[in-house]
Amino acid sequence: MNYTSATFDMADDIQNVLHTAIETIYPYYYPKEVVDFFCRHPSKEHILNGIASGNMGVLMYNDMIVGTGCFDDNHITGVHVLPAYQNQGCGSYIMNCLEKEISKTYDTVILDASFPAVCLYEHRGYKTVGHGICELENDAKLVYEIMEKNGRIIENVD
């Protein structure tokens, strides 16, 4: 496995990773309106902006993009792994890379955690510091955890 900076020619593959992960996993946790919201959020423009910022990376395995991660300042804005590669350490590998990069500048890492990821983040030392809510169509609500991790803990991550 190798985590590297994303390039513009990877945008379609990154979008495929995002949509495949969301469409496969999120329906187990969220109503259709929330899944649709998540599928619209990583638009091609959003991905291109992440690549242009230099803050989006991809996890490569056998010359294939199997995961992606992005951050803005000290905020991890997304980590997604293809379902076939989940539960094999890929998400943790991406998180290690993002945390290491953020800790070069900041003492604290912040992220918004979806229900499927809260336990993973707690296991990594993140603590819930708040809750967010987003009103969606058909009176659906997206509720998420706002979590943070102290940078001193990050230094101990392998």
Image (cartoon, helix red, strand yellow):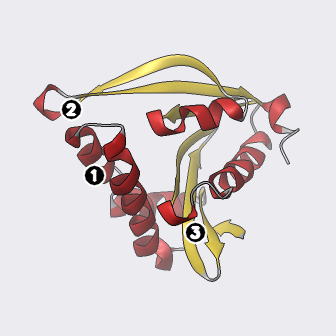
Which amino acid, mark 2? Leu
Residue at image location 65% in from the left, 29% down from the top:
122
Q: Secondary structure at mark 1?
A: helix
Residue at image location 66% in from the left, 58% down from the top:
88
Is there a contact, CB below 8 Å, between mark 3 and mark 2? no
* Residue furthest out toward the right: 156
Which circle marks residue 40 in the picture? 1
Residue 54 image-quadrant placement: bottom right
Residue 96, given in percent of the width and then of the height, sits at 74, 49
> Would you say 119 lies left or right of 156 here?
left
Relative to 35, say whether 135 is above or below: above
Residue on which the image places disc 3: 6
> Would you say 143 lies left or right of 97 here?
left
| CA distance separating discs 3 and 1 | 20 Å
Is there a contact, CB below 8 Å, between mark 3 and mark 1? no
Residue 47, given in percent of the width and then of the height, sits at 43, 61
> Would you say 153 lies left or right of 96 here?
right
| CA distance separating discs 2 and 1 | 12 Å
Of the residues under marks 3 and 1, which one precedes in the sequence?
3
Residue 46 image-quadrant placement: bottom left
Residue on which the image places disc 2: 136
Nearer to us: label 3 or label 1: 1
User: Between residues 17 and 12, which one lies in front from this camera angle?
Assistant: 17
Residue at image location 64% in from the left, 26% down from the top:
148
